[in-house]
Image: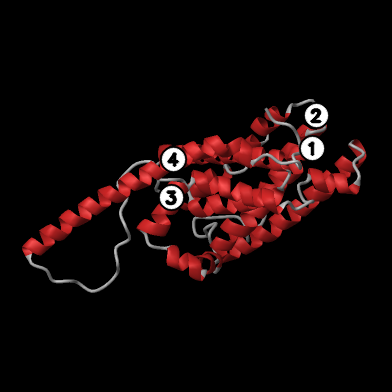
């Protein structure tokens, strides 16, 4: 148990600490964490950290658990790949986000961009997108799920305790964003900055619970990585406010007073219709997610029995 605790702390430190050891990765009032040079340097450091942690984990599993090569790959969630588990994990998450997907695809009329692959191209054409949808999900899920969770199977902790406890380190690993935010937003009062960080810690921990649950139940890290990337893309669902379509960008249109009033009335009516549809789907998605959770995560490749 002591060795695993040391690994938890060490892995979290080696993931975050390099961000502040070098001038190329350390943010400042004049250098944002979103600067391409910072993102590239951080990806290099994170890749090294994850590689070292992977070597250490494989060594511990081989020596302390006497696991074979195939057993180690299974515990890490690397093999067998399990495409069915990947598809079910993504579908389950999409059900939960039924409302936001409807808002983007239908209300904002982006479904054509999705079919053309334009949205994916735009998301990955910048270093910020590459960090949010590729480097971040891959490195975080390998470290905090694929490497840390199997080490906990060497302890007396039950699978449920493992699912609830390990994501706390995932949440703590994001607390350093508080320092970065305060540093790059010096005029923002301290209280809103603290609240912002607490909210971020909360939703990263909640996502960590879900991701760890998926990983233990399916034994598949690829599905968890894709779910992480999807959630980063989708963001937090809207839970209040009126839903409105995108406003087309174009030249001014001249209308009479009666035309303007009629147009505004139609827009308000349409907005309320969209809003009702969105929130109905949001609730339906949450109910569907709750009812499908156990069935969609059932797999013969599960790392442990949960519940």
Label 2: few (<14), some (14–19) or many (≥20) C-alpha neighbours in 10 Å: some
Vertical comparison of 1 with 278: above or below: above
Label 3: few (<14), some (14–19) or many (≥20) C-alpha neighbours in 10 Å: many
From where the camera sits, is residue 56 visible?
A: no
Q: Which mark is residue 151?
A: 1
Residue drawn at 19 percent across, 56 percent down: 266
Q: Nearer the viewer, mark 3 or mark 4?
A: 4
What's the distance in space between the residues labelled 4 and 1, CA to CA? 37 Å
Task: Locate residue 160, reporting x and y percent.
Answer: 68, 29
Task: Locate residue 172, reporting x and y percent.
Answer: 61, 38
Q: Which mark is residue 284?
A: 4
Label 1: few (<14), some (14–19) or many (≥20) C-alpha neighbours in 10 Å: many
Total residue callouts? 4
Residue with the most extreme left position: 257
What's the distance in space between the residues labelled 3 and 1, CA to CA? 36 Å
Q: Nearer the viewer, mark 3 or mark 1?
A: 3
Residue drawn at 32 percent across, 58 percent down: 245
Residue that carries the numbered disc 3 in the rendered image: 100
| Cβ atoms at labels 1 and 2 below 8 Å apart | yes
Label 1 secondary element: helix
Label 4: few (<14), some (14–19) or many (≥20) C-alpha neighbours in 10 Å: some
Label 4 secondary element: helix
Q: Nearer the viewer, residue 265 or 252?
A: 265
Vertical comparison of 200 with 266: above or below: above
Label 3 secondary element: helix
Task: Locate residue 89, reporting x and y percent.
Answer: 62, 47
């Amino acid at each position: 148990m002591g060795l695993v605790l040391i690994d938890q702390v060490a892995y979290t430190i080696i993931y975050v600490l390099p961000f502040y050891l070098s001038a190329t990765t350390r943010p400042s009032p004049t250098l944002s964490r979103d600067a391409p040079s910072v993102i590239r340097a951080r990806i290099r450091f994170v890749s090294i950290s994850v590689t070292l942690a992977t070597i250490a984990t494989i060594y511990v599993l081989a020596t302390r658990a006497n696991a074979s090569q195939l057993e180690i790959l299974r515990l890490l969630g690397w093999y067998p790949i399990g495409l069915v588990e990947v598809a079910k994990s993504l579908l389950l998450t999409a059900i939960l986000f039924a409302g936001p997907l409807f808002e983007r695809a239908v209300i904002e009329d982006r479904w054509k961009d999705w079919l053309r692959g334009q949205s994916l191209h735009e998301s990955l054409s910048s270093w910020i997108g590459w960090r949010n949808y590729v480097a971040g999900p891959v490195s975080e899920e390998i470290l905090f799920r694929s490497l840390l969770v199997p080490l906990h199977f060497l302890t007396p902790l039950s699978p449920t305790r493992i699912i609830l406890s390990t994501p706390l380190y995932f949440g703590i690993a994001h607390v350093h964003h508080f320092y970065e935010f305060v540093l790059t937003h010096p005029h923002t009062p301290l209280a809103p900055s603290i609240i912002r960080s607490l909210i971020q810690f909360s939703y990263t921990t909640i996502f960590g619970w879900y991701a760890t649950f998926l990983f233990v139940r399916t034994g598949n890290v690829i599905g968890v990585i894709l779910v992480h990337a999807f959630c980063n893309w989708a963001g937090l669902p809207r839970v209040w406010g009126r839903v409105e379509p995108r406003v087309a960008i174009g030249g001014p249109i001249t209308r009479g007073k009666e035309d303007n009033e009629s147009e505004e009335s139609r827009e308000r009516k349409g907005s309320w219709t969209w809003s009702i549809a969105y929130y109905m789907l949001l609730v339906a998605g949450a109910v569907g997610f709750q009812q499908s959770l156990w069935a969609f995560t059932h797999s013969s490749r599960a790392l442990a029995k949960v519940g």
